[in-house]
């Protein structure tokens, strides 16, 4: 694998070069919010690389959009028009953080499970991830507790380091190599001093992570708290909103609805969340998760117990968004720490 | 500065009462510039409670947010009272909830807490970064913030919520118990923010809202946190019939925001919780403020200021202006 550098001021030129062969997505600044989107002329401006630590909405929306047409149908003309994305398309995601890339590897398991989901999987196949190492993590980040880290390149195709005036670039996979070759005329060779600067940045960034959780024993402990009043100390103040799940890079629940016009319509899926009351409401009106207590329990247990039981990995990458954006300070690290401390009486 | 000992003592007295089953206040958050709402059920928990300018959340929201699932046969519902802390603006929410008969006056025990302003975490983070202060207090016309042992004084405008800078009701309008002494009104509300926005042309306004509404992810946090949004089933998420689609796009998002702001006309008490919680920084108050002013100017009505008042939309005065209808 190869390494390169380019001048930071030439980012737009670089993305322009990439756009010749790829559809380029990058963090954009839209009315004060940083969010990934397609780089287009006349569209929102590119966010500066030091404008964001984590984008407000995780880039999961590129592979799993909040609202997505599955197929369209029209009366009389017979048949349906599927909207499955093309697996052969070439999409480059520029500036994704290591934790958000790690989340893709977690969600892969779900979308490739009993029903391989062509919508997600085709996009995933066609996407090259050009990651950006974090140099100043948020106060809510705890990626190092979940097998990641601010400079982890394990789930990336290309890893970038912001070295001030220059960006250092290292290819990790063949897909990444191919992309870099396609823009090689815009890249310069890296020197050993660049590599050294990156290694220093790695050490420094990891030492800036302020929060952590020891996940040992948590997947086993949470089911024992199923009926425990433990959850109320958090759920009593929970608003039951969509923030912590919609903004979580590993949350993947969706609803499917038909949107019918007079002669045509579409079947679409849209993000759903276990924090909403109607998520588990039956047609009869009965709701097996009648209060936010059961919903809070489900969110945390799904991530830290059910998902690891089914797929062998915790469905959290420690990006901290659920902590940062919860308006009532429901802090998943706090919940997990307290869950370990509760004593559970043996049944019987 | 409110005496935390007095606050906890009074809270303890309220939660110890036989006829009170829970008490809503604030406790320290785990990080950052905001406290966490606290719902306590036992006198031993009263020592967690605090009050300072980080206590932004409106406790009135949690009175109506509480869910009452169907009880097993033979189990009687616990109908005892709810204790609730209230700053000036929070007390207006409680009053408006009672005006709308969400519950009766004797359902709640109000611990009033005169307030000199609360922190806007967006402003504070812009000034101080992603840090957790050791201390935040208001001293004279300054806000004192201590971070890492270092004290800094800043002007109120720089860190307090916009509502506090125009607050006419810093003292709770109702209370059964009062913590601390009354404070002086900070300023009058001249609606200059609304005037400013109204200078835009219709095209500019539309361009503004198009940008803002297209950011909305419809997490409904703004609705859920609102002390006046307590309908058992919201028209926006109703499934049978479905008035607003679940798809998230400019059209459905606009529909959501117009529905919500109209449903709050003459009801919004301007606690700013909706705007505070929005993860997409959508200036929801810009809509609410316009309706607040219209309601005030057209009908001389100010919601949440009088427990004996009738809701605006159920009261009729032959002198009401009718230009809109005629
Ligand atoms: S659970 Fe929270 S910290 Fe973990 S990945 Fe999701 S949003 Fe990030
Ligand atoms: S935990 Fe916080 S973000 Fe999540 S649903 Fe509850 S209030 Fe909303
Ligand atoms: S809180 Fe913000 S993003 Fe969420 S529904 Fe309200 S306006 Fe939309
Ligand atoms: S609309 Fe906003 S400001 Fe008005 S009462 Fe509701 S949360 Fe408070």
Image (cartoon, coloured by chain):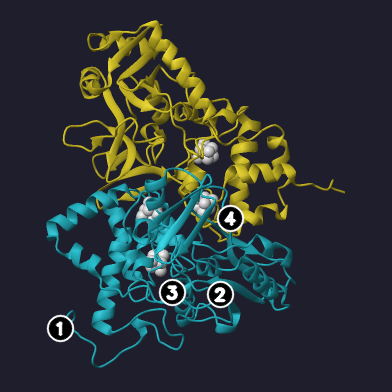
Chain colours: A yellow, B cyan
Residue B6 x/y as whole percent: 64, 71
| Ligand 4 within 8 angstroms of badge 3 C-beta | no
Numbered tag placed on residue B170 in the rendering: 3
Query: Distance between the Cα atoms at labels 1 and 2?
Result: 51 Å
User: Quick one: label 3 or label 2, which is nearer the N terminus?
Assistant: 3
Label 3 to label 2: alpha-carbon separation: 12 Å
Judging from the image, mark 1 belongs to the subunit labelled B
Crowd rating for badge 3 (residues with CA inside 10 Å; few <14, some 14–19, many 20+): many
Q: CA distance from mark 3 to mark 1?
A: 40 Å
Q: Secondary structure at mark 2?
A: loop
Seen at 63% across and 48% down, the residue is: A297
Q: Is residue B280 left or right of residue B137?
A: left
Upstream in the sequence, badge 4 or badge 1? Answer: 4
Residue A288 visible in the snapshot: no
Residue occupied by mark 4: B28
Q: Which residue is mark 1?
A: B326
Q: Earlier in the sequence, mark 3 or mark 1?
A: 3
User: What is the count of numbered marks?
Assistant: 4
4 and 2 marks in contact (CB < 8 Å): no
**Circle on res. A40:** none
């Amino acid at each position: 694998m190869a390494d390169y550098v380019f001048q930071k001021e030439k980012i737009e030129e670089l993305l322009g070069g990439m756009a010749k062969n790829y559809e380029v997505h990058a963090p954009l600044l839209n009315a004060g919010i940083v969010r990934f989107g397609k780089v287009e002329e006349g569209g929102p401006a590119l966010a500066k690389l030091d404008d964001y630590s984590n984008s407000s909405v995780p880039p999961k929306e590129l592979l799993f959009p909040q609202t997505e047409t599955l197929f369209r149908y029209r009366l009389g003309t017979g048949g349906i028009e599927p909207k499955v994305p093309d697996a052969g398309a070439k999409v480059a995601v520029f500036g994704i953080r290591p934790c958000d890339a790690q989340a893709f590897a977690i969600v892969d398991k779900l979308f490739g499970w009993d029903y391989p989901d062509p919508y997600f999987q085709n996009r995933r196949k066609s996407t090259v991830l050009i990651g950006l190492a974090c140099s100043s993590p948020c106060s809510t980040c705890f990626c190092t507790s979940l097998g990641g880290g601010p400079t982890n390149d394990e789930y990336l195709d290309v890893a970038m380091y912001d070295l001030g005036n220059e960006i250092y670039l290292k290819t990790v996979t063949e897909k990444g190599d191919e992309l870099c070759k396609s823009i090689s005329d815009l890249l310069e060779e890296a020197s050993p001093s660049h590599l050294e600067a990156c290694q220093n940045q790695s050490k420094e960034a990891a030492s800036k992570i302020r929060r952590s959780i020891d996940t040992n024993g948590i997947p086993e402990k949470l089911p024992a708290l199923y009926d425990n009043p433990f959850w109320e100390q958090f759920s009593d103040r929970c608003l039951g909103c969509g923030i912590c799940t919609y903004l979580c890079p590993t949350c993947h629940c969706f609803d499917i609805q038909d949107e019918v016009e007079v002669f045509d319509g579409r079947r679409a899926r849209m993000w759903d969340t276990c924090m909403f009351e109607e998520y588990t409401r039956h047609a009869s009106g009965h709701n097996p998760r009648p209060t936010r207590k059961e919903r809070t329990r489900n969110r945390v247990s799904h991530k830290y117990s059910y998902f690891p039981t089914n797929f062998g990995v915790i469905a959290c990458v420690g990006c901290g968004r659920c902590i940062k954006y919860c308006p009532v300070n429901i802090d998943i690290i706090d919940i997990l720490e307290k869950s370990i401390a509760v004593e559970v009486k043996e049944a019987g | 500065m409110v005496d935390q000992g007095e606050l906890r003592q009074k809270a303890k007295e309220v939660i110890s009462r036989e006829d009170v089953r829970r008490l809503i206040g604030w406790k320290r958050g785990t990080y950052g510039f905001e406290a966490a709402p606290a719902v306590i059920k036992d006198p031993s928990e009263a020592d967690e409670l605090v009050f300072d300018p980080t206590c932004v959340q409106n406790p009135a929201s949690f009175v109506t947010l509480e869910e009452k699932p169907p009880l097993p046969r033979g189990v009687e519902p616990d109908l005892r009272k709810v204790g609730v802390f209230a700053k000036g603006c929070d007390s207006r929410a409680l009053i408006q909830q009672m005006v709308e008969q969400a519950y009766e006056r004797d359902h709640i025990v109000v611990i009033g807490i005169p307030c000199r302003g609360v922190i806007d975490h967006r402003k504070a983070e812009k000034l101080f970064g992603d840090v957790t202060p050791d201390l935040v207090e208001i001293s004279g016309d300054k806000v004192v913030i201590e971070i890492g042992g270092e004290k800094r004084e800043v002007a109120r405008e720089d860190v307090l919520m916009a509502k506090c800078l125009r607050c006419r009701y810093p003292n709770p309008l109702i209370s059964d118990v009062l913590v601390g002494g009354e404070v002086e009104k900070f300023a009058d509300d001249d609606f200059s923010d609304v005037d400013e926005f109204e200078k835009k042309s219709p095209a500019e306004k539309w361009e503004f809202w198009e940008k803002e509404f297209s950011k909305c992810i419809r997490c409904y946090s703004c609705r859920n946190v609102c002390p006046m949004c307590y309908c058992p089933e919201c028209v926006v998420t109703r499934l049978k019939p479905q008035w607003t689609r679940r798809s998230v796009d400019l059209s459905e998002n606009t529909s959501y925001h117009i529905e919500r702001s109209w449903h709050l006309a003459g009801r919004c008490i301007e606690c700013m919780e909706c705007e505070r919680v929005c993860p997409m920084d959508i200036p929801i108050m810009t809509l609410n403020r316009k309706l607040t002013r219209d309601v005030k100017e057209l009908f001389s009505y100010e919601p949440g200021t009088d427990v004996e008042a009738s809701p605006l939309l159920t009261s009729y005065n032959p002198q009401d202006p009718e230009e809109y209808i005629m």
